[in-house]
Image (tube, grey):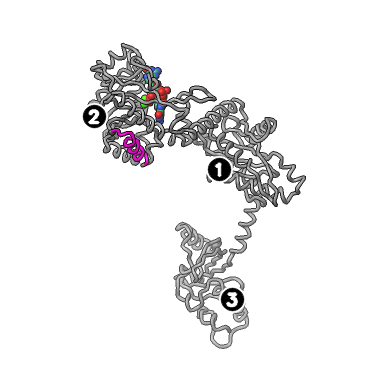
């Protein structure tokens, strides 16, 4: 009779002295079971545990007797879990399931647990008997199997099965939320050559490196998978438009085009990429895949190492856009103190009451050797998306200050020049440093410049924006809200901005005489602005009638073709 166990067996089952043979057998079974066994009384306090229990949990008999089995709990289970367990014990006198417990040393493990209720003749609970197994090793094996089922063993990327499952799910989300999605099929040019001439083991190394580079080209929320052979797919869920896909495709092309060093060889495996878009090119996995595939063959026949959209008009639009983008990159990188493809034009601002020029607005121009003169309406947006607006905007500030100094040297002493500022520029404290530096460098006063931010810019990221605008205003720099009426700023918010000027958007001025709504908006804006102590500037004044109308409403400053188009500095 094993002492450790005997001492913890409920006294009713142990008759001291000569035990009946069946009881001896039962005790042996209890003691030698490979399954951990724990018995509690009607109050659910532990009355017996077997050696397998001690081995599994680290608790010996003395540490457990009289305790609540809660001591084993890992605390990971949902509160509901135990409610349900106790319900089925009350109802069926039995429960089994998987549960995470904690060993004495604090480590947690999954166990498979069965609990039976022992009742007396009246049905009252006498004991609970729990048996359990540590299932961590079979769980690990199951996890490994699941990983194998869903991953490509060579590259560790998701395989076709998991790609299809994830794409289906992403499509559902995009459909629900009205978003677009891009699917890219990527096939390596020349890969067969590498395999055939140098052998599979070299080819495999290249594939592994390709997988790593692909992962680096995408965000964590995107998906890259290997479909087999040298074919990969990338899914970009929730994109804003085809341009995003074109840009990622470009990045992939550049990254994969670099040589691969394997076993002393410098190998090349450029990609041919086909792109299909949800919802325009297909609504389901199979259609999107088929269309991306056919776009990929198109890319192959178009000379490899390129990407093609399934819908050909996208190729042209994206191609134009990308060429413009890369030309812009080159132009911005080439800006030097003496030379640049960029220049500033200036448009006068006229005081309505006197007809005097009181200021100028600096407007950026780009003369591209490839595209000719490009409107800021086309390239400012690209510069903002690509981050090029930072260096470009810096240049505008420096160049404006340089030209103000020039104006002063010609005797124009009290003309303030307005500079347009993009949202990204307002996100950095270095805007303050830059402005301060440029003013100091050309020996100017803060009052010599004015900064224009659009209404929507002022509304973005309000805390940071407000902080920076406040600091600029503290420096003595005038601030204007541009394109007013096109955003959604609240009056309450406007009151907190340290601004001096409101510029009524051109769209309201254009139809001021013919459209009663526009006239009403102008009138209201002017009244509201004056109430807040602001000066009102009307943009895009083209006719004498518009001027008269605006003057009658009390508008303070007028700007537009009626007075002058934006002109180069000399004019
Ligand atoms: P904006 O700040 O609203 O500039 C006024 C735009 O209206 C200018 O177009 C100007 O040429 C045009 N305009 C002026 N008067 C009239 C008129 O009477 N009739 C008509 N139809 N148009 C008139 P532009 O120069 O093409 O600039 C377009 C936009 O590009 C600007 O709108 C501004 O948002 C942006 N932009 C220009 N330069 C810069 C810059 O240096 N930095 C930043 N961030 N944006 C700039
Ligand atoms: Ca402006
Ligand atoms: Ca404007």
Q: Assess whether mark 3 and mark 1 are in contact (beta carbons under 8 angstroms).
A: no
Q: Residue most toward the right?
A: 197
x, y percentage for residue 397? 37, 32
Question: Is residue 347 positioned above or below 473 on the image?
Answer: above
Residue 380 screen position, x and y as percent:
45, 29
Q: Which residue position is annotated with label 3?
A: 30
- Name which quarter of the figure residue 190 lies in: top right
Report the span colored magenta: 430-444
Q: Is mark 1 on a helix, strand or loop?
A: loop
Q: Count of labels shown? A: 3
Q: Residue most toward the bottom? A: 17
Write down the residue under mark 2: 532
Query: Crowdedness of circle 1 by 10 Å Cα count: few (<14), some, many (20+)?
Result: some
Give the distance between the C-alpha atoms of the residues marked 1 and 2, in whole angstroms.
Answer: 48 Å
Residues marked 2 and 3 touching at CB (< 8 Å) = no
- How packed mark 3 is, by other alpha carbons closer than 10 Å (few <14, some 14-19, many 20 or more), is many
Q: Distance between the residues labelled 2 and 3?
A: 87 Å
Q: Name the foreground residue: 86 vs 535.
A: 535
**Identity of the residue drawn at 58% across and 46% down:** 215
Mark 1 or mark 2, earlier in chain: 1
């Amino acid at each position: 009779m094993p002492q450790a166990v005997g001492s913890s067996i409920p006294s009713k089952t142990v008759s001291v002295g000569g035990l009946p043979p069946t009881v001896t057998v039962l005790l042996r079974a209890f003691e030698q079971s490979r399954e951990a066994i724990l018995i509690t009384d009607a109050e659910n306090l532990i009355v017996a545990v077997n050696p397998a229990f001690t081995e599994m949990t680290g608790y010996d008999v003395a540490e457990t007797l009289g305790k609540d089995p809660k001591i084993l709990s890992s605390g990971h289970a949902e509160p509901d879990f135990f409610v349900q367990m106790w319900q089925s014990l009350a109802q069926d006198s039995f429960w089994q399931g998987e549960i995470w417990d904690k060993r004495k040393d604090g480590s947690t493990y999954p166990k498979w647990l069965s609990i039976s209720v022992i009742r007396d003749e009246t049905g009252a609970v006498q004991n609970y008997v729990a048996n359990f197994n540590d299932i961590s090793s079979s769980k690990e094996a199951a996890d490994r199997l699941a990983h194998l089922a869903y991953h490509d063993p060579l590259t560790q990327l998701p395989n076709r099965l998991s790609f299809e499952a994830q794409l289906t799910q992403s499509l559902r989300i995009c459909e629900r939320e009205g978003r677009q999605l891009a699917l890219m099929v990527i096939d390596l040019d020349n890969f067969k050559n590498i395999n055939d001439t140098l052998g599979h083991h070299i080819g495999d190394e290249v594939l592994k490196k390709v997988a790593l580079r692909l992962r680096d080209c995408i965000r964590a929320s995107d998906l890259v998978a290997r479909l087999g052979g040298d074919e990969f797919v990338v899914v970009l869920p929730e994109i804003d438009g085809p341009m995003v896909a074109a840009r990622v495709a470009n990045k992939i092309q550049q990254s994969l085009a670099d040589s691969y060093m394997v076993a002393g060889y410098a190998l090349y495996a450029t990609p041919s990429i086909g792109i299909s878009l949800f919802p325009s090119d297909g609504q389901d996995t199979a259609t999107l895949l088929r269309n991306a595939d056919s776009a990929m063959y198109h890319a192959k026949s178009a000379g490899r190492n390129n990407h093609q959209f399934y819908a050909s008009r996208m190729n042209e639009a994206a191609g134009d856009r990308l060429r413009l983008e890369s030309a812009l990159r080159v132009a911005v990188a080439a800006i030097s103190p003496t030379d640049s493809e960029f220049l500033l034009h200036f448009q006068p601002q006229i005081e309505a009451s006197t007809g005097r020029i009181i200021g100028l607005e600096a407007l950026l121009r780009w003369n591209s050797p490839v595209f000719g003169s490009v409107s800021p309406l086309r390239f400012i947006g690209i510069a903002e998306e690509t981050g090029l607006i930072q260096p470009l905007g810096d240049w505008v500030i420096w160049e404006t200050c340089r030209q103000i100094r020039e104006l002063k040297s010609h005797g124009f002493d009290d003309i303030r020049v307005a500079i347009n500022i993009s949202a990204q520029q307002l996100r950095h404290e270095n805007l303050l440093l830059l402005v301060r530096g440029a003013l100091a460098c050309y020996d100017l006063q803060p009052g010599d410049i004015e900064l224009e931010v659009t209404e929507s810019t002022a509304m973005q990221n309000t805390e940071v924006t407000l902080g920076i605008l406040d600091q600029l205003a503290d420096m003595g720099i005038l601030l204007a809200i541009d394109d007013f009426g096109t955003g959604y700023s609240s009056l309450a918010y406007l009151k907190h901005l340290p601004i001096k000027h409101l510029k009524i958007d051109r769209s309201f001025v254009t139809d001021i005489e013919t459209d009663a709504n526009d006239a009403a908006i102008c009138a209201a804006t002017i009244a509201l602005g004056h109430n807040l102590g602001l000066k009102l500037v009307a943009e895009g004044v083209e006719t004498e009638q518009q001027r008269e109308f605006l003057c009658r409403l009390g508008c303070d400053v007028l700007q537009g073709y009626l007075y002058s188009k934006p002109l180069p500095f000399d004019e």
